[in-house]
Amino acid sequence: MAFLLDRFFITTACIVLLGISGVTAQNMPDAEFGSIPDSLFQMQAPEDDIPYRITNKELNVSFQEADESILAVLEHHIRIKVFDDSVQEASVVAIPYYFENDMERVTSLEAYTYLPSGGRVALSEEDIRTININSRYNVKEFVMPAVEDGAVIEYRYTIERRYIEELPDFYLSHKVPTDNAKLTITYPKYLRYQSYTENFDGRITHDVVYTDTSSVPKVFTIPQPQPVVTERWMARDIPPVKEEAYITTLDDYRGKIKFLLSEFGVPRQQLENNWEVVVARIRDKTDPWESINENNEAEAVGDSIAGSLDGVPESQVQDSIYHYLNERVNFSGQHTAFSQTSGEEVLTGEPSNQAAINQTLVAMLKGAGIEANPVLISTRQSGKINMDFPSFYQFNGLMVRSEIDGQSYLMDAGFSYSQPGLIPVDTYGSRGLVLGEDEYEWIDINPDKSLFDIQIQIDGQLDRNGTLRGTVEAVQQGYPAQIIRQQKADGNSDSEIFRQTLFDGYPQMSAKDVVVKNAEKYGEPIEFTGEFEIENYATSFTDGLKFSPMVVGYRNENPFSGPDRNLPITLDAPEKLDLSYSIKLPQGYRVAVNAGRTIRFSGAEFIERYDNTTGQLDYRYQINIDQRNFSADYFPSLYKLYNRWVELSNSSWLIEE
């Protein structure tokens, strides 16, 4: 018998009998589907407002041979106790499966709600819907029927999987507690898996069970068939993982067990699992360079653009090629690590995925004689790349890196109104595999133009009646500049952009002589100037004027929910905010302000400076967050920084006469 995998074609040669010994371990019997113990109905709601808990989560994996291929059969069984039926998550079930290339399909789905009164309500097949998540995954979603406080939900389903070199992750931890989790793999004689545990410090009982299913008499002279081998992983009382603001994705922090095929064949042979093997598989099955090298039309366009710019620096040629493509593409919203969409479709504005667009960009740069390579990435939603778990399926996106005069540029031509070095927020901060035609390397994805950079200078005059008027000069780079260019392209006037960008919270604001500069000059920052007037900005009292110092750049609430946190922090990108104010006070008015203040720690600082001279109030706020990722140890400092920002935004000074 021969078995064909993506990388291996192994022919059965001989069978070697092995001596096998059993392993004894703590047993966790499977929950019987349809038989709900009374103890679940008697279970009381916990004091910590958990709306439901997973009482049993079981997965049994076995294998079937059909049509000279091997199927992994994954039988799932989940049981949930509901405490608060008003929480939608308590009754909504979502089953993800990998539909691309018919890799997985869901079968044998059954679900029931068991009521405290003793009744049972079955899920109707008509209530199951299929939702497309992205180019790889669909979800079977349904709402369990007749759910009420105290009910028990139970469902089971089977996933048939054609790709067996790795198995789907088995998640131990969820947003709610899990009482019992159990995974078993029943092996055929020709394969074994290596397990990898991530983000879990609890106790996992792991054993291997050998079951003799033979009826052959136990006589030494009679050959005995090999026993059935089952490997098991069991865990109890698993705490929940709380979702926090500013993380990559919660899946990056959930306890899980991952599996890579480690032995295959008869007799079994050890398989090599490393990134070199992954790259070899990419070159064999999903090589971007195959599409790039066949993209003659895009290469010709790149050559033509370069020819029309004879004698200019290569960086300017690259900018011209990038913007030529960026202005014409129609990004479909799909992130993929490889595409067979033609360059002609991309260049004519047909809806195209990220890989198709950026493969076309590589071909255009290649036509111009600029060194460029595709970069395989994992977006924020897909999670961080685990370097210890070599797998092509960790990649779900593709961008471009070029090299000009020793300087590297990272690009995504599907990111509208962008430029080389400014990439989408959901791709910033990941790792990338630069796939050259003959070699590869890993890089960090953190181009210096991908940041939030805002500088604002306000020169104003405060009148006795509370009206604030003055001029604004602003410079914006990175993501804020990209948003303004998008607004200009959408037909917004300079005055509308001025209001939306700076004075969105002031419906009474009027503006004039507003000018937005450099919207078409991508190599320059966006600059705009204008005059403004805000009636009743300061509230008049008998003893003076109540004045809010944070005229622009304010933040109404802290993005973090509380002062305690366990998960690392992942911001969208580095932030730089520089707000300078020079406010002339009404004749005879004065104000007492605090001394300057600085909050500073590794990777971030918040600086306040005040200068209260006669009749004039000068002050400045500078927020510099130079990195995207912070460990949980820095959370109290980061929380304090944002809290100070909110305090200043909501504070007011009394300007006395």
Image (spheres, helix red, strand yellow):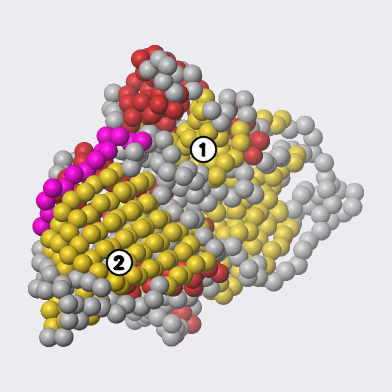
Instruction: Give whichever of 45, 546 is nearer the camera.
Output: 546
Instruction: Give whichever of 424, 160 is nearer the camera.
Output: 424
Provide residue 544's location: percent of width, then percent of height.
16, 81
Q: Is residue 311 visible?
A: yes
Mark 1 burial class by Cα count in 10 Å: few <14, some 14-19, many 20+? many
Provide residue 369's location: percent of width, then percent of height.
48, 18
* Quadrant in which the N terminus is drawn: top right
Which residue has dot 2 on it? 618
Report the residue at 36% width, 26% height from top.
320
**Which one is in front in this view, the residue at disc 1 or the one at disc 2?**
2
Element at label 1: strand
* Residue type pointed to by label 2: Asp
Q: Is residue 286 left or right of residue 228?
A: left
* Residue type pointed to by label 1: Leu
Mark 2 burial class by Cα count in 10 Å: few <14, some 14-19, many 20+? some
- CB within 8 Å, label 1 to label 2: no
Provide residue 255's location: percent of width, then percent of height.
56, 63
Q: Is residue 515 left or right of residue 446?
A: left
Report the residue at 33% width, 29% height from top.
323
Q: How many marks?
A: 2
Span of residues in magenta: 510-523
Element at label 2: strand
Against 277, is 54 above or below? below
Label for residue 67? none
Which residue has dot 1 on it? 376
Report the residue at 51% width, 60% height from top.
603
